Image (cartoon, rainbow, N blue to C red):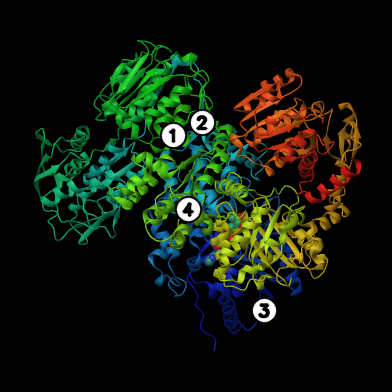
Amino acid sequence: MTRALKLAEVERIPILGTESIVCGFHLVDYIWTDIFSNLPAASTYVLITDTNLAKLYLSKYEESFQVAWAHHSQASAAVAAAPRLLTHVLPPGELSKSRATKSAIEDWMFSEKCTRDTMVLALGGGVIGDLVGYVAATFMRGVGFIQIPTSLLAMVDSSIGGKTAVDTPAGKNLVGSFWQPKRIYMDMAVLSTLPPREFSNGMAEVVKTAAIWDAAEFDVLEASSVEVRRAVLSSTQDADAGLTLATRSEEQKLLQRVIAASARVKAYVVTHDERESGMRGLLNFGHTIGHAIEAILSPQVLHGECVAVGCVLEAEVARRMGHLSEVGVARLVRCLRAYGLPTTMDDPLLRGLASSEQLAGVRPQRLMDIMGVDKKTVGTQKRLVVLKQLGATLELKPTNVSDALILEVLSAGVLVKPVNDDSAAATETVVVPPGSKSISNRALQLAALGKGVCRLRNLLHSDDTQVMMAALQAMGGCEFAWEDGGDTLVVTGGGGALHAPTAEVYLGNAGTAARFLTTTVNLISSGGDSTVLTGNARMKLRPCGPLVDALRANGCGIDYCEKEGSLPLRVSHSGGRGFPGGRIQLAASVSSQYVSSILLCAPYAQEPVRLELVGGKVISQPYIDMTLAMMAQFGCQVQRISETEYLIPLGAYTNPAEYVVESDASSATYPLAFAAITGRQCTVPNIGSASLQGDARFAVDVLRPMGCTVEQTATSTTVRGPPRGQLLALGDIDMEPMTDAFLTASVLAAVAPGNGGVTRIRGIANQHVKECDRIQAMCTELARFGVTATNHADGIDVHARPFNELASATPSVHCYDDHRVAMSFSVLACLAPGGAELRERRCVGKTWPQWWDVLARDLGAPIAGAEPQEEEHVEAEASGVASPSVVVVGMRGAGKSTLSKAAASALGLAFVDMDEYLEQQVGQTIPEIIASEGGWAAFRAHESRLLAQALTKDFATGAIIACGGGVVEAPENRALLQRHMAGSGAVICLTPNMDQVADFLSQDKTRPAYAAGDARDVYERRKPLYSEASNYEILVDKSLPGAWPRIEQEFVRLAAFALGRDCNRVDLAHPSYFVSLTAKDVGEYLANDRLAAVTAGAHAVELRADLLAAIDEDDSLARVHWQFALLRHATPLPVVFTVRTVAQGGAFRGTDAQRMALLHAALRWGAEYVDVEVDAHAAALYAARRNTLVIASHHDPTGRQLRWAQCEFATEILQRARACGDIVKLISFANQWSDNIDCLEFVKRHHSPATPLIALNMGYAGQMSRVLCPVLTPVTHPLLAARAAPGQISVQQINVARATAGLLPARKMALCGTPVQQSPGPAMHNAAFSALGLPHVYGLCETAEASGLAELFADPEFGGASITIPLKQSVIPLLAHLTPAARRIGAVNTVIPTVVGGKSVLVGDNTDYLGMVGCLRRAQVAAFPKASALVVGAGGTSRAALYALYTLGVGSVTIYNRTAQRAEELVAEFSELFVSLVSVSDLAAVGSPDYVVGTIPACELVYPDSLFVKGGVALDMAYKPRWTPLLEAAKRHGWSVVSGIDVLIEQGIHQMEKWTHLTAPTKIMAEAAYAKYNANN
Ligand SMILES: NC(=O)c1ccc[n+]([C@@H]2O[C@H](COP(=O)([O-])OP(=O)(O)OC[C@H]3O[C@@H](n4cnc5c(N)ncnc54)[C@H](O)[C@@H]3O)[C@@H](O)[C@H]2O)c1
């Protein structure tokens, strides 16, 4: 028997004249019943959804379809044949919203024989709704369509209004149509399964809609964030709760109200403007800027998250235009935040989601450009929805807004231009700064406890006051309502009748509220037994002990819940006696807030309070006076009996009808200073002589002595400045009573030359430790204007400068994220002749978010948006000073100091030996410390303390720190290192060959012996500790090829990699390849330069760890590390580290845990790339990757699952891979040739510069996909015994195919100069081209004149030139650019055609010097910085030789030339590169250098024996004969020698790589060059 139907009770919302939006809970039965009974009959129902929803709900819909049809057919006799239900499930996510998916659905519907009477249902979020709607709109020219939105965003936004669309590579939603659904069913029960982030995503639209349309609804959203969130996320879907009105909980009702209200607004707007000609544009509030942000941050950041930031920025535009109040902006921000949404680009949520490249891309001008092509832009005019207040817009359509204004709001910095002098006399301005925080909090408390209604105006809107209000409301003490769009708070006081709140009272970090409420809570007389006051972690550290002691002594029942002396507190309402009153003693030397807390509540105690302040000097008396004065204003006169005793009468406060919160006096100093500096007049109408704020004295005590006219009444202050340039210096002034105003005084003093011109401010020592060291900040930033200021322990001296001599601040003022620094300098900028650019515009938000609006609008300063200069970024990065230091750990004797020193010198960092640092700091040597009473323990204690000091203070950045071997023994040291790593610091562990270390230590008697056991035991014990305390690891084993010099180079590489300085990444701008090694042992490639041969043409080399023999051994990690190190020592190419299981087409048979351990180890070894299969473990690897790039792969060795043309699986796996990889690699298998074309199309469709895609097909039929693969194609090489995958081909094969297919045009290269006929160049380059399958040809262009090159250079097929004598300098005028090396050398030997901005231009380079550097490095005998060299000759080649020696770091060079004058010229030109550069006229005077470089043609010059006394290297650029007299002489003395032919080959290799962007086949080139050379000679 068929079950009974469960028909929900629903609410209907009208749209376009029919009530077709249906809301309720558990709607499935209702939906089918409604469709069958009330909509035109269909033969087929097609329900389309995504996999997420299918899992959860599809079976319910299928079951209910049958049940509802059974009921329907029983009920009406006339029904036709039973309809079909077809279902189709897509991968979730935006990628499915494509043309391809649309056609796939259509093809499927045709195959299922769907006809015109089909009804299509979209069950899902906005993606499914938009896509399926568009299918319905066009299938057979349109079929019926039903929306069943399941995400919050889809319910309140995308399902309503009939907009349907798909995305295209050109942008989102660009192809689509209007197609109205017949029904929209919102089943709110399904929201319980919505991921929390998707809930927030939808709330952005809900808040937006309320903000433009409905103030009351906004109030509800603002007040009920906790309840709404709970309602959405609490599980309601299993039970039938909410099916009927009777079973609907309060939270469900709230949820329905909120969603229905939002949907109703959208429906109303759509009804009145379906095609978006005006009113519908209002729904775009937050979207114009939000979309631009989304274009850059998608898909990592969701639509709603971008819109939330957009809403705030667009609200700021409205505020800047003078329409929306700051209160409105602040409330909007708080409301969005309450729903878990970001509100600024600096929001940690956004920073955590988007990559740093993406975030760097969000630049104001870029956003403006994107907005310029928005579908909603009309012509070039930008249109934004301008809020007038929360709930209402300026117009019933978007408003035209100028670009300059939007740009200003988007900018990080602000340019303040000088204020014009002309209109000065006429300008009299009134400015009301925001309310004082202290007064706002007191006023709230007083009005809440008082009787009657009080309208509070100018209340400060901050987190503190917000917390205070929420707590007072929770105690039911009063009612709050907003008037004037939030400018006025109407407080209906409860007369002191408070009841216990239902939950804990959470106070965040609001100190004032916590102190005040600690007494207030004791007044509670009804409700629960006790109340808990709590706060955030920081709050829990702040003291409240003296106040609690005093109250407890008075009989209040207060307990600490956690730590004695701090929040959380439990205040008992039954055990204690409320607030007894009578005599109270309070220690008031810590905080005046304790005193105010008792004073404010005292009138409500059971007996009159007599408060006695004890325990020394009372702190901050002015704040106590402020409390007393305000109590008087609320009708309570406190009697001060003595200096420290107060008597407070009983009785409720009487609320004044209105209370205007006095403005913040520190903020008021800025507009007043503006008047002073510009000679204008400004009035602050609510601060005067009666003010209780210390800074209120600024006008009288600072501005008047500076020459301003100050008129002050009890409640207002007016200042008029003297004519410009006539401010007087203050001499000595004590600003202790108004420390925060010293910054304002300093900028005025900077342009106050009168009265001696020196202002000395004292009494402000506390300003060293505010948001920044403000005194130092003022000194540094004033210096930018050419003003001298000196920093003192308790003050600052400022030496004035005439204002018209102020320097134009270059390039901009740094504000240290300190609001007071920013506002002070904005005042100075108004007078500086060039104005000034201030960074960090937004930091004023702390106290006066609308300061820039006031400065521009009310005070008339011209301001504009500004971005911090680009150069400074570059500079800061290049210096590397800011990156956290690299720490090096490992056994004693492993080489920590030597390697660290080498890296420090190569990378320009400081070198710190922790042992030396320790000895220096302690004042004893380590053996002395250990021999002393404290022994090893004392040494370890010093070590820990100083490690902390080094890492956090002395050498936190910019150094390489070599630690003592035992540093990892102490857990606290390991914790310190782990903290360093958590802060993105690198700790490199040296993994030694213990035989070598033991050997070394046995020879070293200078250091103390180990306390226990032999070095080997110590190492075994420490091994796990080293790995726990490090994030990089390097094998230091002299038996590796290349021995110590290579170890040193590899260490420098790893340090640079860990620092992110040089990550050795493949340039993906050109076709790129990595060669997959397949041998069981990397050692097989080492003999005979085989690795160089195998890697020719490739940009990286893949170590397939699964193919190694070592992989099955017990200690496989160590063995694989050895193999990795072998590879490292044999090639400079980046390594791709891969472990592939049998299922993935590899050979790894271990567990997942073993596989992942290997991949994580590769991150420690600094592999540039790791390749991981997309599975449950990949995300963890991605999260741990630091500077390694993760290639997220999927392999389908059958080609049956991963099909390029039917996108579902492919797009889903692509999406998953993009979430856990920097590069995605999808490998299928070609069963037919056309699979290659499908693959190519797939790559094109899913192109993303952010995550490159490697996609190809295995198998013979798939070879073409390897030819077409755009990046990092895996390749083999004929010398490899086996291929890593079926169908893998070589770079040569790929290039031949590309050339044949018209993808690789043939180029002409040539050697230019004279004589060139005998050169080995053509043989060498042509051999390289042919080895790599390149269609290029290298010929000769014999000419002695640069003009002879014009024809070659103009040839469209020109591919590059080698330049030789006599053209190396004369070619320069023919070239568009020179590389820095060529420019410094002053000669060019290589011309490279390069595409710049779409145009081909010629770039001149010099590879001669690279050839010399390479050869000398291989023959190196001495440590370079100490080395000396002799250069023979002073022509063009000697210039390259000097630059090569400089590159190698050689310190002193001597030049010998027959004509001394030319040598002298070179000395003058190059001396800045060396410690010493001299010329000599006699070779005997040279001494004995480490290097001799000959640059003249071979001749019978006599080289004296004295040159070759110690060992060294001789290099001769002349190569005819091969053994020149110089080389012969050197050989005779046992020197290493480098022949000119070797340099020629080496420089040719560099040329070839620069022209072709491929790794050169070095061996083949050398062989060809020698063959030609030997044949000629
Ligand atoms: N047509 C319009 O007027 C309009 C308006 C706004 C946005 N949009 C479009 O809407 C799309 C975004 O919609 P979205 O945010 O709903 O994204 P979505 O459709 O991708 O859904 C978000 C995620 O939540 C999952 N999900 C949805 N409901 C769920 C539920 N009840 N339980 C568990 N998981 C659930 C989905 O499977 C998906 O993974 C964008 O393509 C956007 O362009 C269209």
Structural distance between the alpha carbons of marks 2 and 3: 66 Å
Q: Position of residue 1428 (x, y in %)?
A: 63, 32
Residue type, label 4: Leu
Residue type, label 2: Val
- When the figure is inspected, residue 334 is found, relative to residue 196, above or below; the finding is above
Which residue is denoted by mark 2 in the rendering?
414
Which residue is denoted by mark 1 in the rendering?
816
Quadrant where the C terminus sits is top right
Q: SS class of the residue under badge 3? A: loop
Structural distance between the alpha carbons of marks 4 and 3: 87 Å
Estimate how packed mark 3 is, as few (under 14), some (14 to 19) or many (20 or more) residues with alpha carbons within 10 Å.
some
Earlier-in-chain disc, 1 versus 2: 2
Estimate how packed mark 2 is, as few (under 14), some (14 to 19) or many (20 or more) residues with alpha carbons within 10 Å.
many
Q: SS class of the residue under badge 4? A: helix
Quadrant where the N terminus sits is bottom right
Looking at the rendered structure, the number of numbered marks drawn on it comes to 4
- When the figure is inspected, residue 1522 is found, relative to residue 1238, above or below; the finding is above
Q: Nearer the viewer, residue 471 or 1108?
A: 1108
Which residue is denoted by mark 4 in the rendering?
1001
Q: In which quarter of the view is residue 1266 placed?
A: bottom right
Earlier-in-chain disc, 2 versus 3: 3
Estimate how packed mark 4 is, as few (under 14), some (14 to 19) or many (20 or more) residues with alpha carbons within 10 Å.
some
Earlier-in-chain disc, 4 versus 3: 3
Mark 4 and 2 residues: CB-CB less than 8 Å, in contact? no
Q: Would residue 218 appear left or right of 1073 to someone viewing this image?
A: left
The answer to whether residue 179 of the structure is visible from this angle is: no
Q: In which quarter of the view is residue 758 placed?
A: top left
Camera-near label (4 vs 3) is: 4
Q: SS class of the residue under badge 2? A: strand
